[in-house]
Image: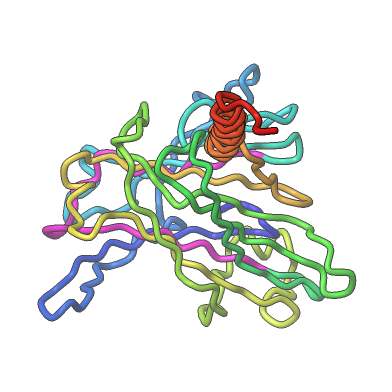
Amino acid sequence: MLMLNLSLWAVFEYSEAKGLEELFYPTYDLSGFSWDSVNRTLNHTALTAEFSGVPATDPGGSFSNGSVGFRVTAYEAGGRDRPLPSLLHTANSSKVEFVLAGVAPRGNGSRFALEVATVEEPGVVQELRSARSIDDEYTPTIFEMLSLVAQSQNDSSTRSFLQWKATAYGSRSPRREDNIQCRSGGLQAANWTLPASSIVRAYFGEGVGSSYTVSAINISFGGEDGEVYQEKRYLSWSALLGFGQPPRDTFSPLVISIMAVALGTPMAMLLVGGCVLLFAQRKRYSEYEPIN
């Protein structure tokens, strides 16, 4: 559970049945998980912490050697993460990493999806934005950035955001070849009720059911064949959570240099070719003596 104005998480597992229909297994409700104490993973120097949990009841034994985890990293200044997807961050943001490690799939070609649900205060509206770029230097082969932005209806100012790149990874030390396809559904009004004991009620009060609205978005992971997680048994997805405007990537120096060379080389060749042609013409005409 995280704050966007506040976000809830649930994990779905599904696979494609015959006729391209999707077969969903019982949902992993994270509110029913047993979570390890964060004290043993809390790093005051690096400003990191990790929450790891398993279902309170696991009749199928899927979590006998696995767990669901959330890694949180706070930042004191702006910069860019070194590990892929190399998110650009500010001092007003934190990184949240969803990790699915060692969990046995319940079907052949299983895929997983993460549900993010947000609670909106009165006068606040959520908007899902997608930005594409030709620059993939920091996150190779990934050209899309998505942002879930909370805006004030009165002055259209951005209050908070959740930002991520359209990729997940199948390795603890992610590389380009560990890329796992990531897709995001549309933002929809959630028609379920919040648990009575939820921290949402503790934060917003008893007006959640009447004064506040709940929206949800599903983020799914896996290729067309659904075999990525079957092979890796590891999945990590990172997002940036913060206040104010989400960070915006500019063109990297490498891409700017490539574009300058690509656009400047033809122009330089035209100029050089024109000069050579003019010089050759003047030299040819100079071989003839003028007729008086």
Residue 257 in view: no
- How did the renderer colour the structure? rainbow
Residue at 57%, 40% in the rendered image: 263
Residue 119, percent from left and from top: 66, 68
Q: How many marks?
A: 0
Going by the image, does 173 lie left or right of 224?
right
Residue at 64%, 47% in the rendered image: 241
Which residue occupies the extreme front position in the image? 292
Q: Is residue 108 above or below residue 287?
A: below
Q: Which residues are magenta?
A: 94-119
Residue 148 in view: yes
Going by the image, does 15 lie left or right of 167?
left
Toward which corner of the image does residue 68 lie, by quadrant? top left
Toward which corner of the image does residue 12 lie, by quadrant? bottom left
Residue at 59%, 73% in the rendered image: 215
Residue 83, percent from left and from top: 47, 28
Which residue occupies the extreme right position in the image? 155
Toward which corner of the image does residue 190 lie, by quadrant? bottom right
Please state which of residues 113 and 43 is positioned toward the viewer in this rendering: 113
- Is residue 113 in the magenta section? yes
Residue 248, percent from left and from top: 68, 46
Residue 237, percent from left and from top: 43, 45
Please state which of residues 57 and 134 is positioned toward the viewer in this rendering: 134
- Is residue 5 in the magenta section? no
**What is the quadrant of the C terminus in the image?**
top right
Going by the image, does 94 lie left or right of 174?
right
Going by the image, does 149 lie left or right of 234?
right
Q: What secondary structure characterizes most of the magenta part?
A: strand
Q: Is residue 46 above or below residue 128?
A: above
